[in-house]
Image (cartoon, coloured by chain):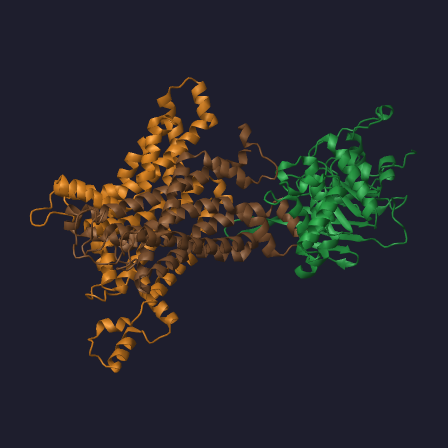
Chain colours: A green, B brown, C orange
Amino acid sequence: MTAVEDVGPLLQVRDLRRYYPIRKGVIARTVGQVRAVDGVSFDVYPGETVGIVGESGCGKSTTGRAVVRLEAPTAGSVLFDGTDIATLSPARMRRLRTELQMVFQDPYSSLNPQIRIGDLLAEPLIAHKRLDRAGARAKAAEMLATVGLPKLSLDRYPHELSGGMRQRVGIARALMLEPRLIVCDEPVSALDVSIQAQVLNLLKDLQGEFGLTYVFISHGLGAIKYISDRIVVMYLGKVMETATTAEIFARPRHPYTEILLDAYPEPDPRLRDRERIIVEGDVPSPANPPPGCVFHTRCPYAQDICRAEAPPLNAAGGARHQVACHFPLAQEAS
Amino acid sequence: MHKRLEPETGQSSTRLMIRRFRRHRLAVAGLVVVVLMVLMAALAPLLAPHDPNRIFDKFESSPSGEHLLGTDSVGRDVLSRLIYGARVSMSVGVGAVVVYVVIGILLGLLAGYYGGWVDQVIMRITDVFMSFPYFMVILILVSVLGPSLLTIIVVIGALAWPMIGRLVRGSVLSIKGSDYVQAAVALGYRTPRILFRHILPNALSPIVVNATFGVAQAIILESGLSFLGMGVRPPAASWGNMLSEAQSITVLSSQPWIWIPPGLMILLAVLAINFVGDGLRDSMESRSET
Amino acid sequence: MVSYLIRRILIGIPVLLGVTLINFLIINLAPGSPADLYLSPTATPEDVARTEAALGLDKPVFVQYLNWLTQLLHGNLGVSFQNREPVTQLIADRIGPTLLLMGTSLVVAYLVAIPIGIFAARRRNTAADYGVVGASFLGISVPHFFLGLAMIYVFALTLGWFPTGGMVTLGRGGGFADRVSHLVLPVVVLATAVAAGMVRYVRSSMIDAFGQDYIRTAKAKGLGASVITNKHALRNALIPVVTVIGVDLSALIGGAIVTEQIFQWPGIGLLTIQSIGARDYAVLMGINLIAAIAVFTANLLTDIAYAVVDPRVAYA
């Protein structure tokens, strides 16, 4: 499912920043900032899945939470269908939320333990006055079947279901308001490996059935590769590279992307003997990011300019392929 | 964990808690006593052998067939007054706690959920109230406002909320960052729905435990105030004002039937409620183990 | 840590002001004019107005509060409506007996509660432990006045071992033994609730401490039970116990009021009851303020003690 070129983007994230102040002392004055997200831009077109990948702490979850405004951005804009949700009033935002939903990482903590599954699913419709109680319950039962859960689950409490079943409930709840965009924040990371594929397939099926657009956040390249049409690679709050899934895997242009791919176990044994690149050092602290290119401290190809000047995100040939690197890797033949 | 504690279909954590509570023998015994006392208060007119305010010509008479617990220094039947006195203790205990739990929950929810200056202001007010020596300020306020059952309920209610407020605030702080509250925000729910349907039910356990002990505290406070003559005004019967007769050495030394029964009733009521509270604490705190 | 202390003390300033304001407002709720107390019942309305003006009572409440606060900062709590004595003087005369009663009770409570708590913890889930826990429940549930009356009935009236009340025997008293015998019953009454609460606290923190890794290490090293109790568990278990002192002050003051009334102990509590009887709001305002400042200070010290014991608190 690739985006139709002549339709405008559904979501435009522009120069998004989220800084957390570090406070100290008697009057708790701000002595520094953690730059969790530091100037991130990307587009999402209707019907596509954009994967955001990166190590933990790279700001991918914060970006996802800012897209649904669970985080207020420090700067930048998040345009959903042309409306900047970063500056929307609370009342208007609450109405817009019906179109923008989220699936959380931990299916154990994202469902209120005191509320039965049926009520959890019916509640969004009741709260937004779409249906009365009986109608909402009927719709909940319907949705439960759609995500592949037995009707019996309606009267269960969350703790009576398995992790995979709970995540299906989380997905069903996000679908109740018939949103257009769903941010999936590591939706399979907390699940057993055997369950992960089932949930990914469910997400894919639902996308076809309801015409959904996904922002899919994960640190695992496997899930990202399977579900995404395009991929955004993040490192230390910034976008390193973005391109279609095929491009990223075939022709990575950023050294960091290359390293990520390298660490990803290639399922095809014939391709396994590619030369491994050893990554040195730890991820620097986002409270004190290195000057210049944030990746230079670990980059095997770093030059003087990389330590002095941050590279902008530039077109790098190919369909919407962009890379933030002074010395992008040569395009090897696939 | 025991096999019989395994969750059954559609079973909420409340049901699990009840099972644990039932294994706590003293707590169950306490609950039985509390229920009996509430019944005694409710059915006082049926249970009492005499009108509690009727004055018999035999005053200060020792227990007899006619007056099982004797008569007091005015000539009223002690047993009947004892039964009616349960009404005062139970209504102060429950009434005052309901008032301050409501205040504490509201302020705690606001402080914890909104944070920032709202939190700062509410917490400083909490600090102010916690600085007053409880019994003394209640005593002074009741004397200023004029002692009555209603005054006692209102004054205890208005002063005792800070503990609940702090508890609720602490729970809200830990719950509001949880994914299910974030999900409720993402689903576009209004703040009252988030506070009362998603946060409060998950913060209830410590409130229930604290409120239970609070009922016992309120009963002691009322009886103390009445004992000092700053509580329920005679002729209305309260266990505390029945005891205050024993401030006379004669009553204390030679008419123990006048003061020992109400004293024992207060002790029994408070002890029973404290056992219930202890049982609730144990059964609610171990909930996380499953 | 230093910045935590400074912040904690700065936060205390508005709290203390709030305490004075609430205290002032409570007394202003009282019906009638304090001017009435200076005048004979036959005074004309003009007399009342003149006296009110002299006392500053014709000014807005807020101005009256500021005036009162200014006086307060000069150490002036006003004069008693009843006998025109300075309130500070009345309180100063009565504070000694109260401090003696509360201090002795606290010391006794600790001396009783700590060994019993340790004893119960070491015999956890035995009949002795259940006995201690049951007794502590009784101790926290029995009202001071009922316990006090029962004590007087048994030990003063029936057995005649101790006097029924007062601080010294009138006429022939004043000796050390006489003072001690007057102190015993009130101290027992006041110490019971404190000790009962404390026993449970010591018991559970000792049980917690026994479960800690360092205690298991000590056991693995082959140290004897008493060495473990004394050197390792006790020290760590008592830290939270000591910091709890402040929290109890409010309850202790409440207990002292009732206890002083029952035993006619001539302290602040008895002064409070007498002032309530005489509607002497100037004295009540002074007592309440001083008690509130004491509780406020105790709360502050408790917070600071927690921060010293557990530095994580300072950064929370």
On the rendered structure, is C168 left or right of A25? left
Q: Quadrant of the N terminus of chain A?
A: top right
Residue C290 visible, this orientation: yes
Q: Residue at x 34, y 50 (%)?
A: B219
- In this view, the residue farthest toward the top is C222
Front-most of residues C90 and B277: B277
Given residues A249 and A17, the one toward you in this image is: A249
Residue A200, relative to residue A95: is it above or below? above
Depicted C275 relative to depicted A40: above or below: below
> Which quadrant of the figure has residue A97?
bottom right
Q: Is residue A91 above or below residue B5?
A: below
Quarter the C terminus of chain A occupies: top right
Question: What's the residue at 74%, 45% (across, down)?
Answer: A143
Q: Give the farthest residue toward the right.
A: A333
Expressed as whole percent of the image width and height from the top left, the position of residue C265 reads 19, 50
Relative image position of residue B284 (x, y in whole percent): 49, 39
* Residue B11, picture quadrant: top right
Q: Residue A283, can we see it?
A: no
> Which residue is depicted at the point 42% across and 46% down?
B212
Q: Nearer the viewer, residue A219 or A285?
A: A219
Provide residue A47's location: percent of width, then percent of height.
Answer: 84, 48
Residue C128 vs residue B123: left or right?
left
Q: In the depicted view, which residue is nearer to us: C156 or C213?
A: C156
Left/right placement of residue B111 relative to residue A167 reads left
Where is residue A8 drawn, in percent x and y? 85, 55
